[in-house]
Image: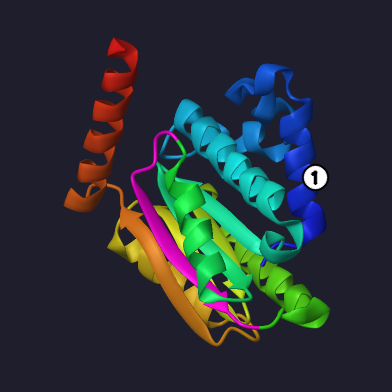
């Protein structure tokens, strides 16, 4: 679970970006531009996904900061993964509805928990889990680590991204399961050449063509 301060820094970056363009988001958000060209989804799609994620988080915080400050939004090729915790079921529904309002959404994956705040210490451990997996994937030369986004909530480690093949994905999941304090690993990773990803790419192309024709 990414800490609220980091989320707000991203939102501030978006607010300061010229005309809130994808290029402005990438320039001010720092590391995004440095890795976008290396990712399987390509430079422009990475920027589009990043802009979408920041925009959704901003929309949620504008609705109610106290309720939605611990919602994390990860986006890969229009597939949105929502994680975190909210007080009640209505808030969970509201978060999903807000995500679907974004242009270019292919899928919304709802992994938001309902209950009390996870607290400062749990948030700290979740952040350590995410950083640990990031490091493991970076050091493993048989894994293209930039294609994966880890997000941990209460020790459950969610992963979304694109795997080059099943062998690479198996290595990623093995690293995830070996990280201290990880209780469960949930994968929403798609294989690079899978029918599921081809369907996503087709839907993205259709939406872009429709927008261009308007």
Residue 149: percent from the left, percent from the top? 54, 56
Q: Position of residue 48 (x, y in %)?
A: 50, 32
Is 141 rendered above or below residue 50? below
Residue 42, visible in the rendered structure:
yes
Residue 34 appears in which quarter of the rendering? top right
User: From the image, which quarter does the C terminus lie in?
Assistant: top left
Instruction: Indicate the position of residue 84 as horizontal and vertical percent values.
Output: 60, 69
Q: Is residue 110 magenta?
A: yes
36 up-or-down from 174: above or below: above
Residue found at the far top of this picture = 213
Q: What span is colored magenta in the figure?
A: 103-115
Q: Residue furthest left?
A: 195
Can you say which quadrant of the picture contains the N terminus? Answer: bottom right
Q: Residue at x 73, y 43 (%)?
A: 10
**Residue 113 percent location from the top left of the image:** 54, 76
- SS at mark 1 in the image: helix
Say which residue label 1 marks: 9
Q: How many numbered marks does the figure carry?
A: 1
> In which quarter of the view is residue 31 placed?
top right
Q: Main secondary structure of the magenta part?
A: strand
């Amino acid at each position: 679970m990414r800490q609220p301060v980091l989320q707000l820094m991203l939102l501030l970056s978006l607010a300061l970006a010229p005309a809130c363009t994808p290029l402005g988001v990438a320039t001010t958000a720092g590391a995004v531009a440095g890795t976008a060209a290396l990712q399987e989804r390509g430079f422009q799609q990475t920027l589009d996904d990043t802009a979408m994620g920041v925009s959704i988080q901003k929309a949620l915080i504008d609705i109610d900061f106290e309720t939605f400050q611990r919602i994390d939004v990860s986006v890969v090729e229009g597939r949105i993964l929502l994680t975190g915790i909210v007080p009640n079921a209505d808030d969970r529904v509201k978060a999903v509805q807000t995500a679907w309002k974004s242009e270019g959404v292919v899928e919304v994956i709802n992994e938001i928990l309902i209950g009390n705040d996870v607290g400062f210490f749990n948030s700290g451990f979740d952040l350590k889990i995410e950083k640990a997996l990031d490091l493991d994937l970076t050091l493993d030369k048989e894994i293209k680590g930039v294609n994966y986004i880890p997000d941990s909530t209460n020790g459950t480690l969610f992963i979304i991204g694109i795997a080059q093949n099943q062998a690479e994905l198996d290595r990623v999941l093995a690293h995830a399961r070996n990280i201290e304090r990880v209780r469960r690993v949930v994968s929403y990773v798609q294989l690079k050449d899978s029918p599921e990803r081809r369907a996503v790419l087709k839907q993205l192309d259709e939406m872009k063509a429709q927008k261009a024709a308007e």
